[in-house]
């Protein structure tokens, strides 16, 4: 069994996006190239044009929405120890 993080990487609206996860990931980007929503299992990190946007201090399931530039993150973490690192 491979327990390595998978990397997703794609270009959209003139931007290059990259992230890490294990399992499943779904992402929505608007026509201006802004993150709208992201959901991933065992999420690690997300970057745009080589610049980190956010990451977790430890892999966890994550759901993120972006409303007017403000990220709302829900992390599946019963220990309440995992930190969202915004860059």
Image (cartoon, rainbow, N blue to C red):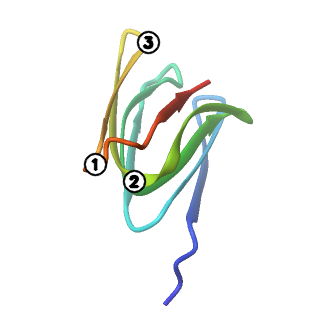
- For the C terminus, the quadrant is top right
Q: Along the polypeptide, which appears first: circle 3 or circle 2?
A: 2
Which of the two labelled residues, at mark 3 and mark 1, occupies the earlier sequence position?
3
Q: Secondary structure at mark 3?
A: loop
Front of the two marks 3 and 2? 2
Is the residue under label 1 in contact with that under label 3 (CB below 8 Å)?
A: no
Evaluate if marks 2 and 1 touch, with contact meaning CB atoms under 8 Å apart: yes
Q: Is residue 69 above or below residue 49?
A: above
In the displayed structure, 9 sits above or below 68; it is below
Q: Position of residue 84 (x, y in %)?
A: 47, 34
Image quadrant of residue 81? Answer: top left
Q: Which residue is mark 1?
A: 76
* Identity of the residue drawn at 74% across and 36% down: 50
Q: Distance from label 3 to label 1 (Cα)?
A: 22 Å
Image quadrant in which you'd find residue 36: top left
> Are the residues tagged 3 and 2 within 8 Å (C-beta)?
no
Q: Which residue is mark 2?
A: 60
How far from the left and from the top, in percent, is residue 86? 55, 25
Secondary structure of residue under mark 2:
strand
How far apart marks 2 and 1 lie (CA) works out to 6 Å
């Amino acid at each position: 069994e491979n327990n390595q993080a998978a990397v997703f990487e794609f270009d959209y609206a003139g931007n290059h996006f990259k992230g890490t996860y294990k399992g499943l990931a779904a992402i929505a980007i608007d026509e201006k190239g802004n993150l709208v929503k992201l959901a991933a299992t065992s999420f690690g990190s997300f970057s745009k044009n080589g610049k980190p946007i956010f990451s977790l201090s430890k892999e966890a399931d994550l759901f993120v929405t972006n409303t007017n530039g403000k990220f709302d993150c829900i992390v599946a973490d019963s220990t309440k120890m995992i930190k969202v690192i915004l860059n």
